[in-house]
Image: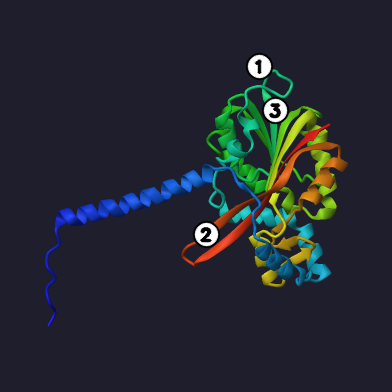
Amino acid sequence: MIQEQPPQDPVAVAAAGAEEQQQDLSSIEVRKVKLQQPLQASIISPEKLEYAQGVISKDKAIKPFWVNKYKNEAAKNWDRFYKRNETRFYKDRHWIEREFSIFGEKTTADGDNERTINCLEIGCGVGNFIFPVLDLNQRLFMYACDFAPHAIELVKQHEDYPQGRCSAFVCDLTKDSLTDTIPAGSLDIVSSIFVLSAIPAEKLEAAVRNIKEVIKPGGMICFRDYAVYDAAQVKFSSNPGHMLDTNLYVRQDGTMSHFFSVEQMTELFEREGFRVEECGYVHRETINRAMDLSLDRRFLQAKFVKL
């Protein structure tokens, strides 16, 4: 015999629902506050660092044929990525002003508070950086390039693109000269946000040299990318078949990811004529509650100034 349940008090039900909703809102606000805070200096424990080093050191590169294939087809694979995901994959990067306040400044490095501040976003994707930054500072003009043609098409289709404050174009930094589109020595700021990691080590010098040609003396590169011993690198090495070269891996979709060290980036940019204003590891602990996992994300953040 099924016993009837006593009727629920509608007031109590409403109160319980309101309390649950308030808890959800509170957790959302906590996450927002956390995201607005500056990333912490790298604080991965020695034990976790030792574990990461151990896993990565045991990994081996895949066969040379496949290494060369993935490197040669990098642009094609990123174009496929954007055709498949369109504008759905990445979120707008509203944290840029927090980490790189220079984009919100109204005065240029030479003290001019009247002229347009000329910027370039390399590896712009579908514009998740471009349009939030242009909205932040009305004095900015933004060039934007990517080696995936479909990504550039999506940037040009954005509702804010026709305002005349952005010029997007297809460019492979390792072989296409930026000066074909941008006047030499004309840029105040260049942003490199998770971009150089898609380029093999042997082509990084060419890319940085290309960028240098369009920056004016005193101009700055704002850089953030993946760092060695990041949780993603440990995951790659835990599943053999992804490693192409030292600290360079391939994802399942054929796109590549390079994990950088402070020493590597410092040496590269100093050799190419930049002063290192800031270069260090930053850390964020990401918690996946559904899988009860805590991941140590490790990034490299830097500011390089052209001499």
Q: Residues within 10 Å of mark 1 (few under 14, many from 20)?
A: few
Q: Quadrant of residue 231?
A: bottom right
Amino acid carrying mark 1 in the image: Glu
State the residue in front, 240 or 276. Answer: 276
Distance CA(mark 2)–CA(mark 3): 38 Å
| Residue hosting label 1 | 114
Query: Does 48 appear above or below 268?
Result: below
Amino acid carrying mark 2 in the image: Ile
The answer to which of marks 2 and 3 sits earlier in the sequence is: 3
Query: Does 153 appear above or below 261?
Result: above
Residue 157, x across and y down, in percent: 57, 39
Q: Answer whether residue 177 is visible to the viewer in this image.
A: no
Q: Is residue 194 left or right of residue 219?
A: left
Q: Quadrant of residue 304?
A: top right
As drawn, the residue found furthest toward the bottom would be 1
Q: Is residue 146 left or right of residue 89?
A: right
Q: Quadrant of the C terminus?
A: top right
As drawn, the residue found furthest toward the right would be 271
Residue 273, x across and y down, in percent: 86, 37
Query: Does 281 appear above or below 122?
Result: below
| Residue hosting label 3 | 118
State the residue in front, 166 or 192. Answer: 192
Q: Quadrant of residue 252?
A: bottom right
